[in-house]
Amino acid sequence: MIEPKLTHGNLLDQGVDIIVNAWNRNLIPWWLLLPQGVSGAIKREAGREPFRELDKHGIIPLGAAVLTGAGRLGYKGIIHVAGINLLWLATKYSIQKSVISAMNIVNEKGFGSIAFPIIGSGSGSRSRRMCLAFMMEAFSTIESKSRVVVVEYRGKSKKQAS
């Protein structure tokens, strides 16, 4: 059972090996989208390379996860999760399956630490409290030696602020 550390701040300021990008199903090419929230911040700081790499994977099943490089970010990679359905809504299934899929990659690759945003609370149009509850329920079913941080967004990253 994972007991994540809950923190307030910016996902891109976390001292972890890998971060999670709450993404869509990859139906629309990334270059047609104007990423906002977590994806927008990642694109601004990491550059386009992780999204170009993600594009090569094609359509992502709901709740699945894809590992890419981290671009200009200092992480070992980015795990992109398909946390919203075709109606741009997050569901209990899509949130929990995204958490499980991301943690499967973490465990398979042996990453020591990971930071998650609150999946579904942005473009997924759900409340932070509900999304966090779904995520915590999923974490309670997973075994991992990795340190897990869940970040509730509060302000620009340290790099953006300077």
Image (cartoon, helix red, strand yellow):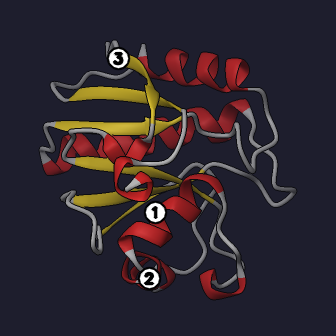
Give the alpha-carbon distance from disc 2 to disc 1, as whole Å.
9 Å
Sequence order check, earlier mark of 2 and 1: 1
At a point 35% along the width and 22% down the height, the residue shown is 142
Mark number, residue 48: 2
**Nearer the observer, 16 or 136:** 16
Which residue lies under the disc numbered 3? 5
Q: Quadrant of residue 67?
A: bottom left
For label 3, the SS is: strand
| N-terminal label among 2 and 3 | 3
Quadrant housing the C terminus: bottom left
Quick one: label 3 or label 1, which is nearer the N terminus? 3
The residue positioned 50% from the left and 83% from the top of the image is: 55
Residue type at the position of mark 1: Ile
Name which residue lies at 70% across and 30% down. Answer: 92
The disc at residue 22 is none
Q: Position of residue 147 (x, y in %)?
A: 21, 26
- Please tell me whether mark 1 sits on a helix, a strand or a loop: helix
Residue 93 percent coordinates (x, y) = 67, 35
The type of residue carrying mark 2 is: Arg
Other-residue count near label 1 (Cα within 10 Å), few / some / many at <14 / 14–19 / ≥20? many
For the residue carrying disc 2, how many other residues have a C-alpha within 10 Å: few (<14), some (14-19), or many (20+)? some
- Residue 6 position within the rendered picture, expressed as x and y whole percent measured from the top left: 42, 18
Residue in the foreground of this view, choosing between 156 and 4: 156
User: Disc 3 or disc 1, which is closer to the eye?
Assistant: 1
Whether residue 41 is situated above or below residue 154 in the rendered picture:
below
Q: Which mark is residue 42?
A: 1
The x, y position of residue 17, in whole percent, is 19, 46
Up the image or down, 94 lies above or below 86; here it is above
Spatial CA distance of label 3 from label 1 is 21 Å
